[in-house]
Image: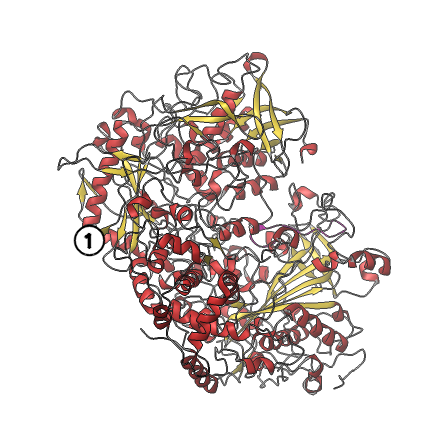
């Protein structure tokens, strides 16, 4: 079966979902919300493509073509991901396909055009973490939707003091450790120019409204919240017992690389204008290129959320590629080092693989002029994988299937920057009916058996990737709990009640660490410890 | 790493455990140039390797995640240490090819330590009890014992306790902890860890139980374990694995402080660097420290040790390696007693908390193997007039069933019921089960398992000491520590009181006891004095992992090694920190006090460097 | 004691397939063949299916809990391999007796054990398999046998050996981290493997879910 080729323009073929907001518009502390309106998306039932797995040659792009005038996906389509299938390989395929739809939907131009020439994306109009969790636990500004399209935001960032106007630039909060130090302070990432990779976290409207409506944006609010945290579910109306259709909560984490002139010259990255900010009068305008992209999406049948991640093709080589001297070949073919976080043909003692630097990596220690830069250390990163075999299908690995799916999708978007991004894989809770159940306290395993067990983005979970082959030997490279797994790690997330109140207890926060980043209404309080 | 060292530092610290780590952090924050020398392996980028070792360990002993390799002959290991495995039978503890310590007593010194980045507290439980006001004034009960310095008492240390609780993150409730005269200037930074079902059950059962004039109650134990997100670390998820390693670092361990020290930009680390000589120069000041570097295979690098220079030197190598280093520093024979030893007390007064561990089955299922290894204890017997006659103790309640008590449950009980054995004593008819019958039977046993732990104060005794072995060396050719250990009558009477308490609690619980009576020949068997019925009972004691007393602090330079600031009487630019400075052991787990004293000393050192 | 034979299991499979879109089911060999794209057919696939069923009977844990439909761990593959290397003949005999064959009705575990009087190889291999599932560690049949017929007096095993003595008495090797984190003794205890908890802060102050939630598939 031939694939539809639409040339340089992407099909733009994913249906719009309109979200009928059930959230009340009145908020107790809403005084001062002049002119803001919460999202009142009108919801059209999504049209999801057939995601069933009959081989990579049979992916029905024709159906996708018919769906989408405006570039927003038919999310969620996870029920279609299952479509009566029950073997690991088919299910994984369904979820990976679904992840690609998600990626394209969220990265579609915010102005409503189809994917094509690089443009600001839909998700960049959402709210980022520091605009939700404000100093002094202040209530955030309400969500503003675009007049043209209610799935697109028109949110303003919280203005900076002592810095030029940030209009049109994404503020990168270097005053927040999470921006340059990976989770749990596991380490920074320095590119081949010595620049930090920087990380940002965004929420969509549904997720934001839940936080806002329930006053979870400060610690006192979290302490006072008596229910179980339960973010809104996405539903496409197809799951049994769930005829409703809603987008549900989506959270995003992106990693960016500071673009140098040579990066900008070859149009391989999605590039935005950013503003590095480290305090009053400490701002530096920069160009940023997208290098990593995480999406977590909560749906009615996946109470543990669906987790996907994408990487730019030039981030790092895989272990296999290093073994097969692919980096050296690329240097020869591409006239120079193509990788952002790897130096080909550098030995282990000069370039220790997947290690954090000795010495301090704090921006203040590294110097802030012209921008924080590590003068002596560049991260040498290799993507280590698990090579999950599907037990019931012999020798095919999950990675093999993803690669083929990537090739198929890349062909559809060839000529755009998005063709340079690869799906790594999707992690989804595989225990049924576990994955559809609320009340995790009643379950022996509230994580519901994530599949695959481990998942890491080499730019976002750089230091908790599986063991390298040289270290693992004939042992499995993934170590339970120590090696990155979206669901297992996020399963540990809790709220953060105020400083030492014996009546309150940290509660599960429904798979997000965003809540614990809230501040106390008493800014000097020790809860705001870093 | 060794070639990037500076010519000279403000401070060189030997040992990267909790004491050395906290001093390094404070000095680094004060912009002093610091070098930390660590005998063992570096702190890694992640804990993949440690977790992998742990999961694969057949015997999940405290040292199981950590290096060096447990199987090697200590004579071939560059930075060896004692292991629980070498204590696990009656022969190995005295076999130098198995035991790193050369033990010369009839009673084994039963505690171990690590030599690795982060120190021994990488596998601590996390218990953060403060010493009691009365502990600092033990002379009221025992006028003959060494006294704590005048300037070190509960009131003067209180602010440092608070300081360290904020620094490392301790969960607790000041209301619950305000007993035995303890007062709190602030509450704990995080709320107390919730009690387990077993804690709750015991608390109900002992309501009204009064012993030695004290009403007993179950209190949550303050712990360096997150009861909410803290300093970018996760909330406890009850992995029930604090010892040997928390998979999510919800339990504080000193590698966190080492990372923070590194982040100041002012602290260098030199791993696989075994300090071997402290060299004294003019005016009895320390001139430099020498260390042997070794490589990843454990082989010495170079043919002579490396020297490092600083204004001030801090030794924080725990209470066996610190005296070992001091005693080794003879200046090629010029100082036969070593460094800092004009009092002759270096290495002496070695103490532990001998621990009595009874175990049994509760009358109903209360579901052990859940939650942190311990969440509560009974603290009411830590102080009282009885300390005139016998040692005090605290009671730790275990949440891990018989895992600690029999060493390896649920494995032992499971193998019993599958292979028709009876090592756990729950299978006297030697049944071998499978299927539903196995499930029912095993569930019944496992869900009712519980154990207590009585940590008994040990009397200081000069005889109990660390010296250098004349015969046995380590992989670097350095003399290994030789240890003589014994228990005094005072301590044994404390163990007897512990047994009596245990019996009373078990009776209240209506529990069935399964504690094994050790054989007479068992070197850890203790014959108790005759009890009220006139019988002499025999119990086993275990080590609590608390190594105390071997370079004690005091106000008299003739009788102590350091002063109240943990500074050597003999060398004014030498500090010796850690539990080796405690003149008495009291009944609290020592780590919080180690840390509080370390922060206090750090402030002194910063002041003296201005 | 209810036995789970392959027959009852497949009956259950058919029922679930009819009702649920996300049933947790066995993959029957025919479903494997129906897979798209080139897939190597594993010659031991059938044996492992039988092994799943036998393991259910041996452990008392429902087979679909031991080997869920979507199984990221493959613990059964590991344990099967261990048993196969240890004593392939005895293993295959057990499987074939349990599953039955043309002219030979399936036997229960009790019957298999009762028949195994001569060299007792089935008896001890079965024990190794049970312990592998329960503890994630391989206790070799010959070691179990030696211990079973040795001096079983607990006073003797305790004397001169102390804590961790079991490791000296019956050597065993952890099969893999995954085998440990999936070991089922913790299910029977209504807890979780020490060092691997997916539970939530504070859970230990509350009663655990009932035993059935741990030993049978969730409804």
Residue marked by disc 1: B510
Q: Chain of mark 1?
A: B
Count residues near mark 1 (Cα–Cα under 10 Å), then give few for <14, some for 14-19, many for 20+.
some
Residue C64 visible in image: no
What's drawn in magenta, residue-wise?
A: A182-194
C53 or C192: nearer the viewer? C53
Residue A352, above or below B288: below
Q: Does residue A187 show up magenta in the picture?
A: yes
Main secondary structure along the magenta-highlighted residues? loop
Residue B281 visible in image: yes
Q: To which quarter of the image does residue B487 belong?
A: top left
> Of helix, strand and loop, which one carries label 1?
loop
* Image quadrant occupied by the C terminus of chain C: bottom left
- On the image, the x and y values in percent for residue C111 come to 35, 72
* Image quadrant occupied by the N terminus of chain C: bottom left
- On the image, the x and y values in percent for residue B226 come to 44, 51
Q: How is the image coloured?
A: secondary structure
């Amino acid at each position: 079966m031939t694939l539809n080729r639409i040339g340089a323009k992407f099909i733009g073929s994913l249906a719009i979902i309109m979200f009928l907001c059930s959230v009340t518009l009145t908020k107790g502390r809403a005084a001062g919300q002049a002119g803001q309106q919460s999202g009142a998306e009108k919801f059209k039932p999504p049209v999801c493509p057939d995601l069933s797995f009959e081989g990579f040659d049979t992916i029905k792009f024709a159906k996708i073509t018919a769906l989408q005038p405006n570039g927003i996906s038919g999310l969620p389509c996870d029920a279609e991901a299952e479509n009566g299938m029950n073997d690991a390989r088919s299910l994984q395929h369904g979820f990976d396909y679904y992840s690609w739809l998600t990626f394209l939907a969220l990265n579609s131009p915010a102005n409503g055009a189809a994917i094509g020439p690089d443009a600001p994306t839909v998700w960049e109009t959402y709210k980022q973490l520091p605009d939700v969790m404000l100093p002094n636990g202040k209530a955030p500004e309400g969500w503003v939707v675009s007049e043209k399209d209610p799935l697109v935001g028109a949110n303003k960032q919280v203005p900076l003091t002592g810095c030029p106007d940030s209009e049109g630039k994404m503020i990168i909060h270097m005053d927040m450790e999470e921006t340059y130090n990976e989770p749990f302070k596991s380490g920074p990432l320095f590119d081949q120019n010595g620049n930090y990779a920087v990380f940002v976290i965004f929420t969509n409207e549904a997720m934001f409204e839940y936080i806002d409506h329930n006053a979870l944006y400060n610690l006192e609010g979290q302490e006072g919240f008596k229910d179980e945290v339960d973010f809104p579910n996405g539903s496409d109306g197809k799951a049994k017992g769930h005829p409703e259709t809603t987008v549900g909560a989506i959270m995003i984490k992106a990693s960016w690389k500071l673009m140098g002139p040579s990066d900008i010259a070859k149009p391989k990255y999605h590039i935005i204008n950013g503003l590095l900010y480290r305090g009053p009068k400490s701002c530096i305008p920069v160009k940023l290129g997208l290098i990593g992209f995480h999406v977590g999406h909560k749906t009615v049948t996946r109470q543990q959320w669906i987790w996907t991640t994408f990487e730019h093709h030039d981030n790092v080589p895989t272990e296999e590629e290093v073994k097969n001297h692919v980096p050296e070949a690329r240097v020869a073919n591409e006239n120079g080092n193509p990788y952002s976080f790897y130096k080909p043909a550098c030995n282990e003692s000069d370039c220790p693989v997947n290690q954090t630097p000795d010495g301090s990596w704090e921006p203040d220690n590294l110097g802030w002029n012209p921008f924080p830069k590590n003068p002596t250390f560049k991260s040498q990163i290799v993507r280590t994988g698990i090579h999950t075999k599907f037990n019931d299908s012999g020798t095919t690995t999950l990675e093999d299937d993803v690669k083929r799916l990537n090739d198929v999708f890349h062909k559809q978007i060839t000529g755009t920057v998005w063709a340079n991004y690869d799906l790594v894989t999707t992690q989804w809770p595989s225990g049924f009916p576990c994955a559809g159940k609320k009340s995790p306290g009643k379950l022996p395993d509230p994580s519901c058996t994530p599949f695959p067990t481990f998942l890491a983005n080499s730019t976002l979970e750089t230091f908790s990737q599986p063991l390298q082959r040289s270290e693992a030997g004939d042992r499995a490279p993934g170590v339970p709990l120590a090696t990155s797994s979206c669901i297992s790690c996020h399963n540990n997330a809790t709220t953060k009640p105020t400083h030492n109140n014996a009546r309150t207890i940290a509660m599960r926060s429904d798979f997000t660490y965003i809540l614990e980043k809230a501040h106390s209404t008493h800014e000097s309080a020790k809860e705001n410890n870093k | 790493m060794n070639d990037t060292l500076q010519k000279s530092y403000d401070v060189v610290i030997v040992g990267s455990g909790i004491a050395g780590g906290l001093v390094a952090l404070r000095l680094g924050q004060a912009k002093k140039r610091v070098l930390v020398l660590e005998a063992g392996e570096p702190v890694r980028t992640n804990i993949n390797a440690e977790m992998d070792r742990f999961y694969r360990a057949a015997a999940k002993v405290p040292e199981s995640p950590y290096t060096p390799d447990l199987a090697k002959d200590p004579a071939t290991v560059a930075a060896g240490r004692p292991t629980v495995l070498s204590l696990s039978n009656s022969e190995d503890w005295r076999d130098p090819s198995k035991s790193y310590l050369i033990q010369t007593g009839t009673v084994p010194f039963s505690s171990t330590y690590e030599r690795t980045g982060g120190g021994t507290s990488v596998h601590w439980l996390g218990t953060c009890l403060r010493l009691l006001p009365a502990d600092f004034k033990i002379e009221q009960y025992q006028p003959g014992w060494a006294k704590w310095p005048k300037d070190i008492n509960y009131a003067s240390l209180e602010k440092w306790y608070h300081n360290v609780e904020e620094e490392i993150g301790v969960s607790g409730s000041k209301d619950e902890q305000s007993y035995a005269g303890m007062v709190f200037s602030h509450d704990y930074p995080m709320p107390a860890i919730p009690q387990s079902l077993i804690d709750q059950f015991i608390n109900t059962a002992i309501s009204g139980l009064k012993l030695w004039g004290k009403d007993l109650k179950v209190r949550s134990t303050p712990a360096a374990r997150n009861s909410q997100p803290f300093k970018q670390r996760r909330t406890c998820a009850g992995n029930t694995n604090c010892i040997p390693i928390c998979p999510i670092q919800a339990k504080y361990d000193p590698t966190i402080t080492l990372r923070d020290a590194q982040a100041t930009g002012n602290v260098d680390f030199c791993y696989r660097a075994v300090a071997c000589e402290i060299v004294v120069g003019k005016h009895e000041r320390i001139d430099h420290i020498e260390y042997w570097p070794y490589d990843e295979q454990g082989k010495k690098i170079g043919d002579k040790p490396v020297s490092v220079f600083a204004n001030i030197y801090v030794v924080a190598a725990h209470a066996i390696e610190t005296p070992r280093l001091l005693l080794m520093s003879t200046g090629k024979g010029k100082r036969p007693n070593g460094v800092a030893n004009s009092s002759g007390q270096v290495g002496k007064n070695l103490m532990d908390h001998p621990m009595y561990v009874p175990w049994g089955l509760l009358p109903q299922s209360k579901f052990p193997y859940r939650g942190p290894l311990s969440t509560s204890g009974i603290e009411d017997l830590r102080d009282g007039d009885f300390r005139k006659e016998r040692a005090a103790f605290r009671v730790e309640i275990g949440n891990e069933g018989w895992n600690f008590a029999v060493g390896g449950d649920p494995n032992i009980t499971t193998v019993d019921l599958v292979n028709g054995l009876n090592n756990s004593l729950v299978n006297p008819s030697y049944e071998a089960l499978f299927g539903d019958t196995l499930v029912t039977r095993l569930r019944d046993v496992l869900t009712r398992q519980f154990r207590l732990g009585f940590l008994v104060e040990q009397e200081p005794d000069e005889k109990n000491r660390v010296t250098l072995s004349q015969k046995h060396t380590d992989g670097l050719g350095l003399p290994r520590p030789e240890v003589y250990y014994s228990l005094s009558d005072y301590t044994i009477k404390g163990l007897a009181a512990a047994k009596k308490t245990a019996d009373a609690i078990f009776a209240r619980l209506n529990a069935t006891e399964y504690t094994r009576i050790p054989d007479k020949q068992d070197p850890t068997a203790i014959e108790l004095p005759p009890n009220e019925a006139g019988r002499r009972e025999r119990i086993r004691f275990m080590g609590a992992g608390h190594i105390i007393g071997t370079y004690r602090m005091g106000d008299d330079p003739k009788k102590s090694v350091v002063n109240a600031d943990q500074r050597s009487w003999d060398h004014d630019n030498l500090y010796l920190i850690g539990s080796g400075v405690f003149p008495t052991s009291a009944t609290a787990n020592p780590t919080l006090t180690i840390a509080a004293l370390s922060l206090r000393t750090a402030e002194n050192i910063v002041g003296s460097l201005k | 004691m209810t036995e789970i034979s392959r027959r009852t299991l497949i009956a259950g499979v058919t029922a679930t397939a009819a009702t649920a879109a996300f049933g947790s089911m066995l993959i029957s060999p025919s479903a494997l063949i129906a897979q798209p794209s080139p897939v190597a057919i594993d010659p031991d696939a059938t044996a492992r299916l039988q092994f799943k069923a036998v393991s259910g009977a041996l452990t008392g844990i429902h087979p679909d809990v031991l080997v869920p439909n979507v199984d990221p761990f493959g613990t059964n593959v590991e344990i099967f391999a261990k048993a196969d290397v240890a004593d392939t003949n005895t293993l295959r005999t057990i499987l074939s007796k349990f599953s039955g064959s043309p002219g030979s009705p399936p036997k229960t575990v009790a019957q298999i054990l009762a028949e195994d009087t001569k060299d007792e190889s089935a008896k001890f291999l079965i024990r190794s398999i049970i312990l592998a599932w329960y503890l994630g560690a391989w206790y070799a049949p010959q070691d179990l046998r030696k211990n079973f017929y040795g001096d079983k007096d607990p006073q003797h095993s305790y004397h001169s050996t102390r804590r961790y003595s079991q490791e000296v008495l019956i050597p065993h090797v952890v099969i893999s981290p995954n085998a440990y984190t999936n070991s089922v003794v913790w299910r029977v205890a209504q807890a979780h493997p020490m060092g691997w908890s997916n539970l939530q802060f504070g859970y230990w102050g509350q009663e655990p879910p009932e035993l059935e939630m741990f030993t049978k598939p969730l409804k």
